[in-house]
Image: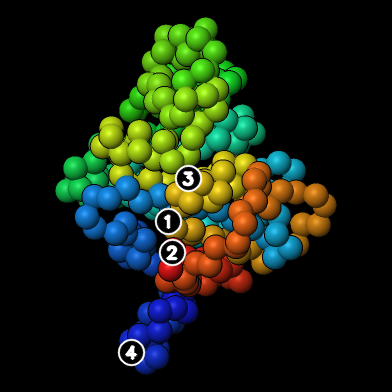
Amino acid sequence: MRSLFPVTDETAAGGSGEAREWSLDELAERYAYPPGGTPWLRANMVSTLDGAAQHDGRSQPISSDTDMRIFGTLRALADVVLVGAETVRLEGYRPARAREAFAARRAAAGQGPAPAIAVVSGSLDLDFSLPLFTEPLVPTLIITGAEAPAHRVKAAEQAGARIVVAGDSAWVDPAAAVRGLADLGFTRLLTEGGPRLLGQLVAAGVLDELCLTVSPMLAAGDAQRIGGGPSIPVPERLELTSLLEEDGFLFCRYRRT
């Protein structure tokens, strides 16, 4: 892997700009959260050259080993991972695991051994017998609205999930979700989609950063883009802060301007 941006004296001299394997510590430094303790929500998504976020309903076919290495690093830096209920069902989500390579870093940051998974669902149409609920290292969270079905809320709590109410209706208010997680001490926030959830976060104006892997593949078909759902009146411009490349894959990091 090589760094294409930012351009530094070392890069120009053939240092970090040369293709080489990056250590997990180097990746963790490149993707470190901003200091200060203010809630910061980043998304991590992958897209083909023609805009497909999935192939046959899953992101794995358009990913790579390095993409998964960065995926693991971003998880290891986060307090909590937000994911939509549909993505939990399609991708077969499992609990986040503790990783020895990041144990000291997480301990120094006051974090637990692994990030919590927070499933965003208004209806709580979830299978509570899945390992995500029966085998988590830290309790799985469910972010839902105040009018969510009471019997599903009870079932979730009986399965050991922790309920976070975000919004006064049956559906989730993204801004309230961020505030609710921050109130629980989760300020390093990561979302892995899917597209509907990412679109809702963008429309609500709560997304601070996008880590986007551009896959050198074409998928055609009618696969979703990385962001779906409601549109916004004016497209929001982000600032490129980092660009890595390996084997034709581009690993981009954008922030709010």
**Residue at screen point 24% across, 50% down:** 37
Q: Are marks 3 and 4 in contact (CB under 8 Å)?
A: no
Q: Nearer the viewer, mark 1 or mark 3?
A: 1
Residue 191's disc is 3
Q: Secondary structure at mark 3?
A: strand
Mark 4 = which residue?
9
Question: Mark 1 belongs to which amino acid?
Answer: Asp
Instruction: State which mark lies toward you, 4 or 1.
Output: 1
Q: Is residue 241 above or below residue 212?
A: below
* Residue 240: % across, % down: 47, 72
Whichever of callouts 4 and 1 sits on the residue coming sooner in the sequence is: 4
N-terminal of the pair, mark 1 or mark 3, is 3
Single out the mark in the foreground, 4 or 2: 2
First-in-chain label (1 vs 2) = 1
Relative to 52, 244 lies left or right: left
Q: Check if mark 1's residue and mark 2's residue have beta carbons within 8 Å.
A: yes
Identify residue for label 2. Answer: 255
Which residue carries the number 1 mark?
A: 208
Q: Residue at x 36, y 61 (%)?
A: 31
